[in-house]
């Protein structure tokens, strides 16, 4: 998982989006042996940067999916938006 988190941070940096904080949740593997991490990032950035961050992450991490996205602009003239971006990363559990 540290390698995947590093890739997500690289994608945010390349898009010009600062990830000041985030949290993740691990959901135990089902009978299929596939587990999932949910990565949740509150972001304040320009809309274009948020979209670029999402696109870069989905392109560079094949096991990632966009799970939740909410975007809010406080006023019409604001150049930045507040976004809540949640990815889900599917991984194969290595336990027998």
Image (spheres, grey):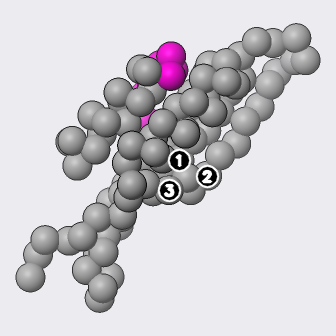
Q: Are marks 3 and 1 in contact (CB under 8 Å)?
A: no
Which residue is under mark 1? 86
Question: In the rendered view, does 39 fall on the left or right side of 85?
Answer: left
| Residue drawn at the location 48% of the way across and 47% of the way down | 58
Q: Position of residue 67 (x, y in %)?
A: 56, 56
- Residue lying farthest to the left in this orientation: 96
**What residue appears at the point 31 percent right and 70 percent down from the top-left corner?**
35
Residue 24 seen from this side: no
Q: Does residue 82 appear anywhere in the picture?
A: yes
Q: CA distance from mark 2 to mark 1?
A: 5 Å
Q: Label 1: how many residues lie within 10 Å, few (<14), some (14-19) or many (20+)? A: many
* Residue 65 horizontal/vertical position (percent): 50, 56
Point 63% across, 33% down: residue: 51
**Element type at mark 3:** strand
- Which residue is identified by label 3? 65
Identify the magenta region.
15-22
Which residue is pictured at 30% across the width and 85% down the height? 32
Q: Looking at the image, do the residues carrying marks 2 and 1 touch, with CB atoms under 8 Å apart?
A: yes
């Amino acid at each position: 998982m540290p390698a995947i988190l590093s890739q997500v941070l690289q994608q945010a940096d390349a898009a010009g989006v600062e990830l000041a904080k985030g949290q993740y949740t691990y959901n135990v593997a089902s009978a299929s042996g596939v587990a999932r991490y949910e990565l949740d990032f509150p972001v304040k950035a320009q809309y274009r940067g948020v979209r670029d961050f999402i696109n870069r992450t989905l392109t560079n991490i094949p096991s990632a999916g966009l799970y939740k996205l909410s975007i809010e602009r406080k006023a019409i003239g604001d150049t930045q938006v507040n976004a809540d971006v949640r990815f889900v990363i599917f991984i194969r559990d290595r336990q027998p």
